[in-house]
Image (cartoon, rainbow, N blue to C red):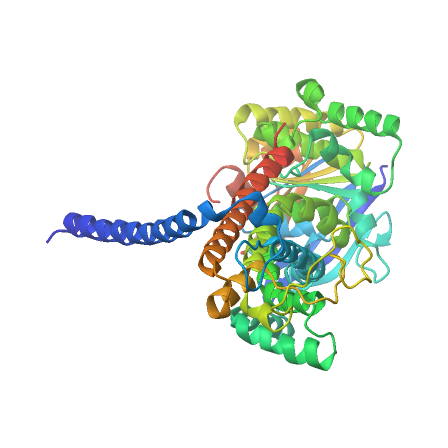
Amino acid sequence: MNSKTQNKIAIGGLYGIAGLVVLILLALLGYILASGVPQLSWHFLTAPGKAFLKGGGVGIQLYNSFYLLILAMLISFPIALGAAIYLYEYAKDNWVTTTIRTAIEILSSLPSVVVGLFGFLFFVVKLHLGFSILSGAFALTFFNLPLLTRSIEDSLRTISDVQREGGLALGLSRWETVTRVILPAAVPSILTGVILSAGRVFGEAAALIYTAGQSAPALDFTDWNPFNISSPLNPMRPAETLAVHIWKINSEGIMPDAKAISSGSSAVLVIAILLFNFAARYLGKRLYKRLTSA
Amino acid sequence: MKEEILTTQDLHLYYGDKEALKGINLNFDEKGITALIGPSGCGKSTYLRTLNRMNDLIPNVTITGTIKFKGDDLYAPSADTVQIRKEIGMVFQQPNPFPFSIYDNVIYGLRIAGEKDKEKLDAVVEKSLRQAAVWDEVKDHLHESALALSGGQQQRVCIARVLAVSPEIILLDEPTSALDPVSSSQIEATLLNLRHDYTIIIVTHNLQQASRIADRTAFFMNGELIEVDQTKNIFMNPANKQTEDYISGRFG
Ligand SMILES: Nc1ncnc2c1ncn2[C@@H]1O[C@H](COP(=O)(O)OP(=O)(O)O)[C@@H](O)[C@H]1O
Ligand SMILES: [Mg+2]
């Protein structure tokens, strides 16, 4: 067999494998959307759930998912940004840096169930935060931090060193070069990373089951005082998210339309995550264009 | 007699154990252009980068000897690298404008230093771009991205960016080697305009370029300064055999 035929066979094999992956993905997406989208309605998206009767919605779970996402991002983004800047722009190549990097590596490969159980023992039990949005947000921070740090570090790496030299040679300090030259140039790519990680956080269930809890008490959307128990803003209330909801209905749902609600919720989750991904691409590209051309 | 603005005495630089500069003694008068020439790897860039302390950024570099800028030791513990780099600007081989507008590129140094007066900034932008001989080409797109310009225009915007912080010395490391001949000669013309107002030190591997623009030329080889003299003498009547061989193209 000559090398040309070998090459052809290899390429054919690779195409086949890639095609198979795409096919599986499409089948999965198609199934979820086909069985879920017919369940969707304004009522389904906004109404509170019902435990025993049919006709409940996922309004509260959907709201909880976004609220948790925002809180988790508010906590993890500044930390991840600081850590990434330190690691990439300042840290010397010594054993401390290597240790930090290894720790991040290990943290990022930790199964989210383990993060969830740690969150339960530490935030819920030890710190007496109970099953609450806050416990959930901290658990999500642990889950998100290593991935986000690495993604921001990668964004900084894409900015060429000639930019750093340019800044320093102009008499900017190290800090000014980082904050006024490197970060603005890296914004599009950082933004993309943030949105993609938001998608991951949004779909996370295992880290939340024992931290944010599995109940979605009714919310009063006219009460925005965060200290009231039924206020949507109260960070100390338990808050089941959409992903946790899907898990729960499928394991112990007793409402007559459990199957339909689960399908509908899955479709909402998948669509939301797809939207995050498209938004990431679109905004990243737009911003990059804005910064680099007319 | 002219003042010496920058002096180097017995300058050694080591990358780890490797000695890249082996005792350089070289002084620069105020104003005018000095070209640094020599075969690649002989330490021209290394030497240039010691003059505004850009080598500080590289780990494991050891520097001994003395460099004085207007009488002050550049490497004194109290020396302020940020201030030094404002007074001794640098232009690189690869044009490296920031990914912002032309206007923002030019005033970046000043704006970060806290200058807010719009009229003053506008004036500095125009003056610097004129000095860098690129004003006519970019004056109608000041607020478009500098990355949209040609390589030669980008390089002149980078020169304008350095001029805007009013340095006394401008270091250039092969500023035309990434450019086409037309852009190169525009940069040369720009430098010839600037030589009356600034002390310019340029590394070039292009001997014709050195002979066209430099008042003085220094020949480096293997980390040593072999000879420095008026450009005319270096090219017509070099004192050293190695210089003569290099100039006549026998090696390097
Ligand atoms: N960052 C560095 N680390 C180690 N060695 C270096 C570094 N930069 C340059 N060198 C070495 O120092 C010598 C001089 O390099 P350089 O100053 O770049 O030469 P030139 O600019 O004349 O071509 C070369 O042998 C080069 O390999
Ligand atoms: Mg060089």
User: What residue is drawn where x is 62% and y is 34%?
Assistant: A292
User: What residue is drawn where x is 83% and y is 49%?
Assistant: B83
State the image coordinates of residue A133 (x, y, percent, origin top left): 69, 65
The residue lying furthest to the front in this view is A53
State the image coordinates of residue A187 (x, y, percent, origin top left): 65, 46
Res B8 seen here: no
Q: Is residue A221 above or below residue B89?
A: below
Res A181 seen here: yes
Quarter of the image for the N terminus of chain A: give it: bottom left
Quarter of the view holding residue B65: bottom right
Quarter of the view holding residue B67: bottom right
Quarter of the image for the C terminus of chain A: give it: top right
**Residue nearer the viewer, A150 or A91:** A150
Q: In the image, is A152 to the left or to the right of B118? A: left
Q: In the image, is B94 to the left or to the right of B71? A: left
Quarter of the view holding residue B96: top right
State the image coordinates of residue B241 (x, y, percent, origin top left): 55, 45
**Residue nearer the viewer, A234 or B206:** A234
User: What residue is drawn where x is 83% and y is 54%?
Assistant: B80
State the image coordinates of residue B57 (x, y, percent, origin top left): 68, 57
